[in-house]
Amino acid sequence: MTAFRIALLATTVLPVLAVAQQMDPSMQMPGMGAGSTTEVAPPRTSAPAQAGMNGDHDMGAMRGTTSSLPRRVGAKRAAPSPAGPLASHNAGTMDGMGGIEAQREMPNPPPPPAALSGPAHAADLVYNPSDMATAREELRAEQGDLRAYRVLIDRLETQFQEGGNGYKWDAQAWYGSDINKLWLKSEGNGTYRGRVEEGDLQVLWSRAISPYFDLQAGGRVNFGPGPQRTDAVIALQALMPYSYNVEASLFLSNKGELRSRLEAEYDLLITQRLILQPRVELNLSAQNIRELGVGAGLSTVEAGLRLRYEFIPEFAPYVGIEYERKVGNTAGYARASGEDVGSFKYLVGLRSWF
């Protein structure tokens, strides 16, 4: 009978104690006053289990954990200190933190004078200086002063227009390094019924003055049925960001005539192979040159669109349209000679380089 009573008591009391442990001690229980001081016994833990925990950390101060110390039922939780639950931790004793503080305070003095007292090339102390100078020159030539060349036929086209079809070319070639180049440029047009109407050949020395701009200087020779001129040339050629090609040239003839030309074009990639190229050219003169049919100020304007397809980058046929207009006194000279002052041209041509 005694054993039966003990078993009945155990099955009744133990669940109540388990529920009491899980409940928030600060909750008011029915029938209990706010000042009740009934203590709930903590669960017994073995000594080895307690030794395995960090003894210097107050686990009861950490959020989300329940202290294993006895707590009075109904007692309010203590507010955390302003320093936070980790205030008892010494940050200076954490691994790595001391090293960071030391690095912040580490001085950064200049190198000692002895470090700069050696030769400009330390390898000369070990190897033959003459051999090392030869090796450095070869490295400079191969990596920073490589000689190369390129030939570009930018426009080689047939022009269909009223009054007779014609042709036009615009080609250039260069040889040199990234800094210095020798340029050859030629441009002109003519009709299939006769010879070349006008053309020129330029020989220029080019030097890079910035990552985008080349300064060019040289001479130009004109050829064709009209009056001949030889010009001194100074030009600025640029490949701008986003692939804008810009060229500005100034020509001073052997007769003291000053003229200039501005060109700009842009490659708009519709696909990797199909490219639309708008192009604008302006020609200006500082004075009237009646024998050349050129008036002072803005003399001619050309604007065109060319659509090319690059089967390979070196071979790209194209079609296009171009409008040319003579303005100002140049238009007056053209009217006096019975020429048109403006015309549309339909183009079929080829762009190639090697």
Image (cartoon, grey):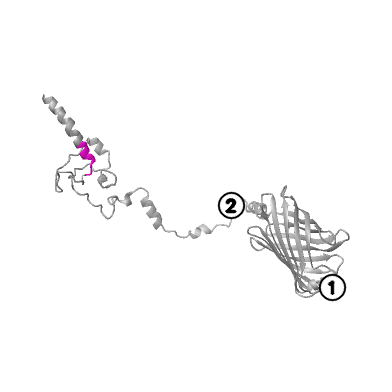
Residue 343 seen in the figure: yes
Residue 196 spot, x, y in % from top left: 85, 62
Query: Depth-wise, is mark 2 or mark 1 nearer the camera?
Result: 1
Quadrant in which residue 179 is drawn: bottom right
In the image, residue 321 sits, relative to residue 12, either above or below, namely below
Magenta span: predominant SS is helix
| Between 26 and 111, the one nearer to me in the picture | 26
Quadrant in which residue 243 is drawn: bottom right
In the image, residue 66 sits, relative to residue 104, either above or below, namely above
Relative horizontal placement of residue 292, taking residue 13 as reference (left or right): right
Magenta region includes residue 148: no
| Residue at image location 69% in from the left, 51% down from the top | 274
* CA neighbours of label 2 inside 10 A, class few (<14), some (14 to 19), many (20+): few
Labelled disc at residue 39: none
Residue 185 spot, x, y in % from top left: 77, 60
**Mark before the other along the chain sequence, 2 or 1:** 2
Is label 2 in a helix, a strand or a loop? helix
Quarter of the image with the N terminus in it: top left
Labelled disc at residue 336: 1
| Residue at image location 84% in from the left, 61% down from the top | 190
Residue 2 spot, x, y in % from top left: 11, 25
| Between 283 and 148, the one nearer to me in the picture | 283
Is label 1 in a helix, a strand or a loop? helix
Q: What's drawn in magenta, residue-wise? A: 17-24
Which amino acid is tagged 1?
Ala
Residue 13 spot, x, y in % from top left: 17, 34
* CA neighbours of label 1 inside 10 A, class few (<14), some (14 to 19), many (20+): few
Relative horizontal placement of residue 90, taking residue 158 as reference (left or right): left
Relative horizontal placement of residue 201, taking residue 128 as reference (left or right): right
Labelled disc at residue 123: 2
- Alpha carbon distance from label 2 to label 1: 76 Å
